[in-house]
Amino acid sequence: MKKAAKIAVSNVLANSGQVCTAATRTLVSKTKHDEFVEAVKEVLPKFPVGDPRDENTFYGPLVAEKQYDRVQEYIKKGEEEGATLLVGGTGKPEGLEKGYYVKPTVFTNVNNDMVIAREEIFGPVMSIITYDDLEDAIRIANDTIYGLAGYVVGDDPKTVEYVASSIRAGRISINTPPADFSAPFGGYKQSGIGREWGDYGIEEYLEIKSVVGMSS
């Protein structure tokens, strides 16, 4: 569970959450919710926010005041909609009042109909959503207008492969493998059309010539 929490947190806080593949919706079995929440609280200190020039810092400030204000509004919206604020919240981290720093923020009791689950926040905000069984998890995962990336964590190879193949997203990572730029990258639904990287990415830059005829 601690490994799963580390993977989840790192995929939310990387680059201050300003990542198109950020895993801001974290789906957890109802039976594992409390254990996962405790693991998240335990691993969060290992991902400190601070001056990006400090080698001990995991993530720094947001890119601009406009984006900072936008993320703050999303955090407020999460609280207004009834999600439970586990850690973080509005305002800046203590000692980091200068700059567009955002507290690492985690919500529990998130419903997939909430704005913080439906829209791309682009900040260090995690929404924990529980599911009843595997099919329910897949249904929730696919209940989105986006489909760029997804992450699956588990020990049973058949189960994680089944879930990975069932998620409607262009790139799925199982148990955080190293980056593979030979594999195609791109999204489904409103996350775009076409692919970068790999053979598919090269083909987009090629001109195809067709010669059509018939024998004399």
Image (tube, rainbow, N blue to C red):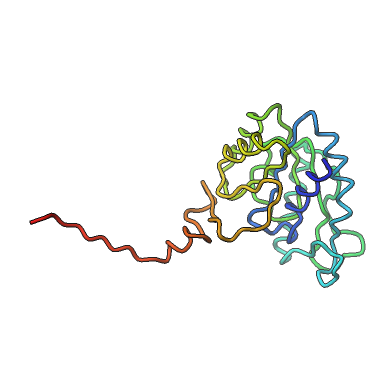
Vertical order, 164 against 202 (above or below): above
Q: Quadrant of the N terminus?
A: top right
Q: In which quarter of the image is the C terminus?
A: bottom left
Task: Say how many tags the image has.
Answer: 0
Image spot of residue 196 (x, y percent): 52, 60
Between 122 and 180, the residue placed more toward the observer is 180
Q: Which residue lies furthest to the left in this view?
A: 216
Vertical order, 52 against 11 (above or below): below
From the viewer's perspective, tell me whether residue 151 is left or right of residue 33.
Answer: left
Residue at 85% from the left image edge and 35% from the top image edge:
35
Image spot of residue 43 (x, y percent): 87, 49
Residue at 75% from the left image edge and 32% from the top image edge:
29
From the viewer's perspective, tell me whether residue 212 is left or right of residue 132.
Answer: left
Residue at 63% from the left image edge and 56% from the top image edge:
20
From the viewer's perspective, tell me whether residue 71 is left or right of residue 204.
Answer: right
Q: Which residue lies furthest to the right in this view?
A: 95
Between 82 and 105, the residue placed more toward the observer is 105
Image spot of residue 195 (x, y percent): 50, 57
Residue 79: image quadrant is top right
Between 209 and 106, the residue placed more toward the observer is 209
